Amino acid sequence: MSDSWIAADENRRQVLYWRLLARVFDTEEQPSLEAASVAIVDDLGLPPALLDPSVSVDTIVQRFPDLATELRGLLAREDDAASLPADDRLPRRAGAAEVRRAALVSKLLLNVFSTGSGSVTATQLARWQRDAGWFERALGAEPGQLRGHPGAGGLGGVLADLEGDLVRRMHLREVLADPALAGQLTPSMSLIEQLLRDKANLSGVALANAKALIRRFVDEVAEVLRTQVQQTSVGAVDRSVAPKRVFRNLDLERTIWKNLTNWSPRDQRLYVDRLYYRRTARRTTPARLIVVVDQSGSMVDSMVNCTILASIFAGLPKVDVHLIAYDTHALDLTPWVHDPFEVLLRTNLGGGNDGPVAMATARPKIADPRNTVMVWISDFYEFDRSQPLFDGIEAVHRSGVRFIPVGSVNSSGQQSVNPWFRQRFKDLGTPVISGHIRRLVFELKRFLT
């Protein structure tokens, strides 16, 4: 009897997944699979709307709140049956749990990965973004985390591509011109990329709405990055400066330890004849941080993330931050480095790569090489000027500047770097670091502390 139950549950699970594949790759319904799936979902006590791709996951959860708990972490758990009580792990219960899991997983995958074709409205994009948020929750992440914010995994690239395709299929200019429709948009890296590319063609209400979306996204990413940077203390403690003798600097533990010989057993008191204070003065020489970012088409997320990151470091005491963006021309954005929103509005995404032009702008900014770090973010695919750029980089490195080459600065950590440059950086002793933004934050904090 148990074997027949196991076989039946396995067949039901396969029906749900075959139905999922059929709907993802063919919009036409398969009547036999649809009828069988309806019967399975009904037997599980799940709502029939779970099978309707036109009903969002968000709507399902609103109507059936108990499902929210099941969906969270659904794809992060290896085996639902393993969570059953030890005395209750019967084949029937375990099989039924897997069939139920298959029904919920199918809903998530169908709504997120079956995006159709043709034009997309702001409402459809907003709905997909909410459904993608539930998919991210099922993976154990927070909504939006895998699509364009720091801390994403490899799947983030797939979701970002899907979202980018939806954004490209929108009549974005018409949507932005309507405040009601624009208000339905949720800012994402894909949307920001499109806005930055099209900003020259926007005006009036559309431009104002575009700026509002960019500002929202900048603020959201800045908040995430700020939590990673906020522990940074700039400059080493200066031992040559006497500690300031104020209460907040009192080293109570050391004071007690040093005065233990003054303990009076008769009075049961510790008599203190000397107070000890912590040294808090830091060397005042500012660290100079020069960030050079390739703003060609393949480096959009790097431009956004690094612009925001540079502004955060610029807000720290004793850090002198300079920001340069380049394609075939170099643009010194240092005057606006404290406002990433203004920086992004001044960039022109796309074009080729001319690193030597950027180096010619960056090198005069080096005043004290051993107190300077230069971060260069690019895929290093140059227009037949690879050797001149590398010669300039090598000269900067030999002068004492800490040079940090970065393949890209994105959410997924994926990067594509010209192999010629990658090998030469390795030989120089300055290997290209991972493209994950957390790694860049770590490297910069290590230099500045």
Image (cartoon, rainbow, N blue to C red):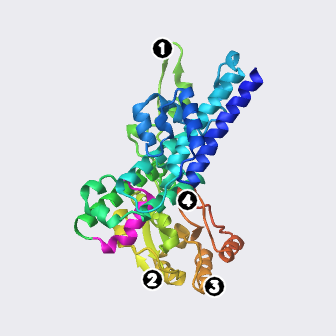
Whether residue 399 is in magenta: the answer is no
Start-end of magenta stretch: 186-202
Residue 12 lies in what quarter of the image?
top right
Q: Secondary structure at mark 4?
A: helix
10 Å crowding of disc 1: few (<14), some (14-19), many (20+): few
Q: Which residue is at a point 54% across and 35% down the rendered structure image?
A: 38
In the drawing, what numbered circle is on residue 267?
1
Q: Which residue is mark 3?
A: 387
Q: Amino acid at mark 2?
A: His
User: CA–CA distance between discs 4 and 1?
Assistant: 57 Å
Expressed as whole percent of the image width and height from the top left, the position of residue 87 reads 70, 15
Q: Amino acid at mark 4?
A: Leu
In the drawing, what numbered circle is on residue 406?
none
Marks 3,2: beta carbons within 8 A: no
Q: Secondary structure at mark 2?
A: loop
Q: Which residue is at a point 36% across and 57% down the rendered structure image?
A: 121
Residue 314 lies in what quarter of the image?
bottom left
Q: Which residue is mark 4?
A: 440
Mark closer to the chain start, 4 or 1: 1
Expressed as whole percent of the image width and height from the top left, the position of residue 196 reads 38, 68
